[in-house]
Amino acid sequence: MEPLSGELTTLREFRPTDLDDYLGIAGDDRVTTWMAFDSYDRAKAEKNLAGIVERSAQEDRPDYMLAVTRPDDDHVIGFARIAPSGAWGAKLGYAIGADHWGHGYATDASRVLLRFAFGTLGRHRVTAAIGPENEASIAVVKHLGFTYEGHLRDHVFTNGNWRDSLLYSLLEGEYASR
């Protein structure tokens, strides 16, 4: 798959050589406190990255987990994922390294993935499930036009506890009218 470009970010396939950058995000408690998984150690990051690379090579791939870089620098500063769900839906997820928070990268990467989901993948509906305390991520989806749908109780088990999620969605027609 060719890289996808936004104003602030480029989304490209992960490579095995991205391990140190990937671990710097997936192994950072400041980031994973908001995620649906606990921080990775190097072995877990290496195994997970190998799975990402393997899935990206499948003809009928189950998801698009892409490395987020800046257009002028190929180092991975985050990751963004769109996972087709059912015949017409998709789930959006993203994480930006803590040292890069506050620059609009999550919003830009999500905007790029929405264009891909509604255009290339022909999806009708994209959802995002976000922890209720994750105000920055909630602000991202609201800025992109998502609508709050509901509260999912004990939705994910992470960091030793069950966590609720808030469900947001964006429909194809809402996206097209923006």
Image (cartoon, rainbow, N blue to C red):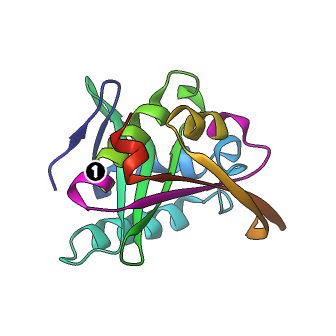
Which amino acid does the dot numbered 1 rest on? Phe
**Compared with residue 173, is residue 140 higher up or lower down, i.e. above or below?**
above
Q: Horizontal placement of 23 versus 6: left or right?
A: right
Residue placed under numbered mark 1 in the picture: 116
Residue 61 screen position, x and y as percent? 28, 74
In depth, the one of 89 and 110 nearer the eye is 89
Residue 141 screen position, x and y as percent? 56, 41
Residue 137 is at least partly visible in this image = yes
Which residue is rendered at x = 45% and y = 30% of the image? 105
Residue 70 screen position, x and y as percent? 33, 28
Whether 119 is among the magenta residues is yes
**Compared with residue 69, is residue 127 higher up or lower down, i.e. above or below?**
below
Which residue is rendered at x = 56% and y = 52% of the image? 26
Which quadrant, please, contains the N terminus? bottom left
Which residue is rendered at x = 60% and y = 47% of the image? 147
Tell me which segment is drawn in magenta: 118-137
Q: Quadrant of residue 120?
A: bottom left
Whether 170 is among the magenta residues is no
Residue 154 screen position, x and y as percent? 81, 70
Q: Residues within 10 Å of mark 1 (few under 14, many from 20)?
A: some
